[in-house]
Amino acid sequence: MRQTETAGTAGPSDLPERNTEAGDDFLSLVQGGLEARIARSRDDIEAAQALRYRVFYDEMKARPSTETAALRRDADSFDAVCDHLLVVDPARRDLPGGVVGTYRLLRRSQARTHGRFYSSDEYDISIFEDYPGETLELGRSCVERDYRNRSTMQLLWRAIAVYVFHHDIAVMFGCASLPGTDPEALGLQLSYLYYYHLAPPALRPRAIEERFVDMRIVPREGIEPRAALGEMPPLIKGYLRLGGFVGDGAVVDHQFNTTDVSIVVKTDLVTDKYYRHYERDRR
């Protein structure tokens, strides 16, 4: 899930100096030579921003501002208040901090400090502002090209499950992207998501009116689910496998060259298979 607001780029002085005393060490997982952990320092966050720039701007051809292009870091004002989940390969000395994967994590308590959730630029997410229990917005997810495999994604999701368990998160949500800005060309995928995975009303964000794109482009009877899933980005397919839902309406993001959908996942669907493992580790 990736958020699309990039105004108010955060410079180095805007980022916090973090340390392990802040409680970040509850999460440290090692698998196949990679480590998943929460960013502990300004350098860690800047390494995540550098990865985001390589993926979003160099690879996906998003349009950087002059300042973003000069820094070669994807940064905004939310970076200072979010937790940054990192996957680090210590052997990759050619990459800043060895960071090869990242997710940006924003709990409701943090969003209130900042003033809002970042996906409120695209969706009415008021249902999550008042939802009983803590909520978590996922954003800015990306993985270095050579690490886009099942092992890396499993490590990321194990880490998210531990984070969810630690903070007692009830619901996760955010935006996920389809490549391109022509909804008609993405009609099969958008229509499939609407007809087969629409969130129940109590968990259903809706695209804000001025950006709302109706997802019902192909009639339901014209959808072949297997074909639709075959065209779906792997990240969205992963959320669907976890029992995730989509909100009502897509949003075209011309800056990032994507069409976004709102994703909602009940955390009990994510953590069930990790809870027992995590509890064993704590004994």
Image (spheres, helix red, strand yellow):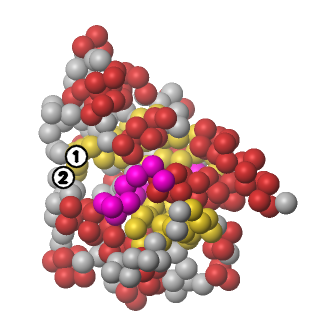
Q: Tell whether 36 sits left or right of 275.
A: left
Quarter of the rendering containing residue 235 = top left
Image: 19 above or below 74: below
Residue 160: x percent and y percent? Answer: 57, 56
Q: Residue at x 16, y 60 (%)?
A: 61
Please tell me which residue lies in front, 89 or 133.
89
Q: Secondary structure at mark 2?
A: loop
| Magenta-tinted stretch | 135-151
Amino acid at dot 2: Asn
Q: Tell whether 23 sits left or right of 177.
A: right
Q: Residue at x 27, y 34 (%)?
A: 231
Please tell me which residue lies in front, 87 or 245.
87
Image: 113 above or below 218: below
Please identify the residue farthest to the bottom as the structure is shown.
13
- CA–CA distance in space, label 1 to label 2: 7 Å
- Is residue 141 a member of the stretch shown in magenta? yes
Q: Tell whether 9 sits left or right of 200.
A: left
